[in-house]
Each structure stands twice: as C-alpha cells, then as structure tokens.
Image (tube, rainbow, N blue to C red):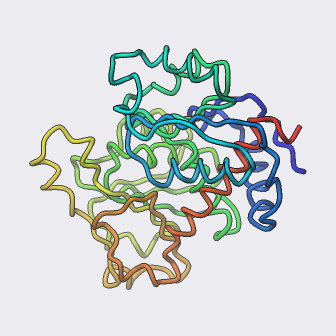
C-alpha cells in the first residue's frame, strides 16, 4: 500500500501539496486503476459530506462514486436551497455542524475564498471542489494525472488554454500548478474580454519565469501545442446576458481547425462542454476529455483514502 502522508490535511488550492505528494497521489491512483478491487473496503465506516452550493455533475458524482468504491458512504446536498443556507445560516455554522457528523467535507461554493473559510471552522479535512473563479484543485489533479498518463511525464511541453480564461477556475488552478514543473510553455487563447487575470501573469508566471503568450486566434497556434485545454464560456459568471451571447461561441474546435495540429496533441476539457468542441472531434484519438473524466474518479479515490488516513 502506497502511503501519501496526507492524513487529516485540507486541500484548498493546488499549492497545498508538494510535487512529491502529488506524484504519490498519481501513483496511488494508477494502482487503483490497475486493480479495481484495490482499497475497495478501505474506507468502510467513513462518511463523506458533499456540500454543493453550485451545480455539478462530474465533480460531485465522481467524489461520491470514489467514496462508495472505497467502501464508505456519503451525505450532503446538490443545491443551496436544500440546506439551511436558504434560511440564512452562515457558512461557518453549516461547516461546524456538518463536521460533527462526517469524516471529511467536499464543498463547492460560488464565493472565492469560501473553502479557505470553511477549513478554519472544520474539525475534519475540507476539500475545495471549486470556489467561484478562484481554484478547483481536484480538477487540477485530474488534469495533471491525465497529462502524465498520456504524455508520460509532466513537463517539457507547450500547453494552450482556450476560451474563458478570465473566469475559468480550472484554468487558473492548472496554470498555477504547471508553473511548478520544468520547461512548461503556455499559450493563452481568448478574446480580449476573457483574458487570463493579471494576478496569474504577474504573481505566478512572471515570478516563476514561465514563457507565455496571449493570442486571439486558435488556428494560428494550434500547430505549436502539445496540450490544448478547451473551456466553455461560463454563463453563470457574467453580469449581463448580452456579453455572454456575444462571446459564447468565440472558439469552436472542429476537425477543420484540427488539421494543423500535431498527431500527438492531447485535447482536454474539464467539462461540461456547450459548443466549444464539435462532437465530430470525439472520435479523434487525440480527444482525451472523457478519459480525463474517468481519471477524475481514480485521483479522488486516492485523495480520499489518503486524507482519511486509511493508508497509515
């Protein structure tokens, strides 16, 4: 059994774990993938709370599937109207209460910093499943594991982020995480209104001397990319409908646009997609976003087993 030494730890943003700790998680997740019965009953008697104040399909269900496959159980809610938040209960009180019943908490909240606040009141580990446009660390672990599985390692490649780079928390988290690896080059592809925030560029990329460029045309750079990370334009983050409608179809990846792309290109998407990847791309061997979703369950199994201390 491959111990990760993460027992009792919170995961709020990608930098909370060292590269060695993440590598150990990836190795454990690979062992789980290779052996479907590995760790099957390891979390028997453990209870996971899934508190989702925003909609989710993959993140919530993959966490619940992960816990059930480990032999544990889940409770929680999928929308705030199902909780006492609808009555005006503070987040701190919700977390204090839920921590009395469970062994770990997974939470998604539309407010930046909500997961960090929750961790200050919880007596059990808190895992951030997305806080507004800020972080989504378990999606980042999923993305990194997918790259590692297909590319063979994490490092020495060019990654293009395309679409909503302003509000996309998966982009922010992954860019921050990749900046810790060697020889990473980044290309940010978006309309001017949806460019990556300045704090990512100045506070992370410039600080770590990461080579990057900003462009507004996918076709001009797709041939230079090893990884293409597509994102949807997020309707829920816009303040007015007109801006969303104007920008929502800025980039649509289809087979015509794929022609200059390398045969080894890895196409990722955190999902859900709307129009940004045409269904015809799904059958291309470079389309890896459904593999990515599957790896998400394995890495969350590894994470839960680790923070719940069943590997010690």
**Percent position of residue 157, x then y:** 58, 63
For the point 49% across and 15% down, the residue is 92
For the point 13% across and 41% down, the residue is 240
Residue 238 to residue 294: above or below: above
Residue reaching furthest left? 242
Left/right of residue 47 with respect to residue 36 in the rendered view = left
Left/right of residue 22 with respect to residue 97 in the rendered view = right
Q: Quadrant of the C terminus?
A: top right
Residue 76 to residue 168: above or below: above
**Percent position of residue 237, x then y:** 27, 41
Task: Locate residue 26: give its quadrant.
Answer: bottom right
**Percent position of residue 66, x then y:** 65, 52
Judge by depth and name the residue closer to the eye, 188 or 59.
59
Residue 151 to residue 111: above or below: below
Judge by depth and name the residue closer to the eye, 111 or 250.
111
Residue 307 to residue 274: above or below: above
For the point 21% across and 46% down, the residue is 193
For the point 44% across and 49% down, the residue is 171
> How many numbered discs, if any?
0
Task: Locate residue 112: give its quadrant.
Answer: top left
**Percent position of residue 170, x then y:** 46, 48
């Amino acid at each position: 059994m491959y111990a990760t030494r993460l027992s009792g730890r919170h995961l709020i943003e990608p930098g909370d774990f060292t590269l060695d700790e993440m590598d150990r998680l990836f190795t454990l997740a690979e062992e789980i993938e290779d052996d479907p019965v590995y760790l099957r009953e390891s979390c028997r008697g453990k209870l996971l709370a899934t508190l989702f104040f925003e909609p989710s399909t993959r993140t919530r269900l993959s966490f619940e599937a992960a816990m059930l496959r480990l032999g544990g159980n889940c409770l929680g809610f999928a929308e705030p109207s199902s909780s006492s938040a609808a009555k005006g209960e503070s987040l701190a009180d919700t977390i204090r209460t839920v921590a009395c019943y469970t062994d770990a908490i997974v939470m998604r909240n539309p407010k930046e910093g909500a997961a960090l606040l929750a961790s200050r009141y919880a007596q059990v580990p808190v895992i951030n499943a997305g806080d507004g446009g800020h972080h989504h660390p378990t999606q980042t672990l999923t993305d990194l594991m997918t790259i590692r599985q297909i590319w063979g390692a994490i490092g020495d490649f060019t990654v293009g982020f395309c679409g909503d780079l302003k509000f996309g928390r998966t982009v922010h988290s992954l860019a921050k995480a990749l900046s810790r690896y060697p020889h990473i080059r980044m290309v940010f592809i978006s309309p001017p209104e949806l460019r990556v925030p300045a704090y990512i560029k100045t506070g992370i990329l410039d600080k770590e001397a990461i080579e990057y460029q900003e462009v507004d045309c996918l076709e001009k750079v797709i041939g230079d990319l090893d990884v293409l990370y597509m994102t949807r334009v997020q309707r829920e983050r816009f303040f007015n409908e007109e801006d969303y409608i104007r920008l929502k179809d800025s980039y649509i990846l289809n087979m015509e646009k794929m022609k200059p792309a390398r045969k080894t290109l890895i196409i990722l998407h955190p999902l859900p997609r709307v129009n940004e990847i045409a269904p015809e791309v799904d059958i291309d061997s470079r389309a890896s976003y459904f593999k990515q979703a599957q790896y998400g369950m394995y890495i969350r199994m590894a994470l839960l087993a680790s923070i719940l201390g069943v590997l010690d």
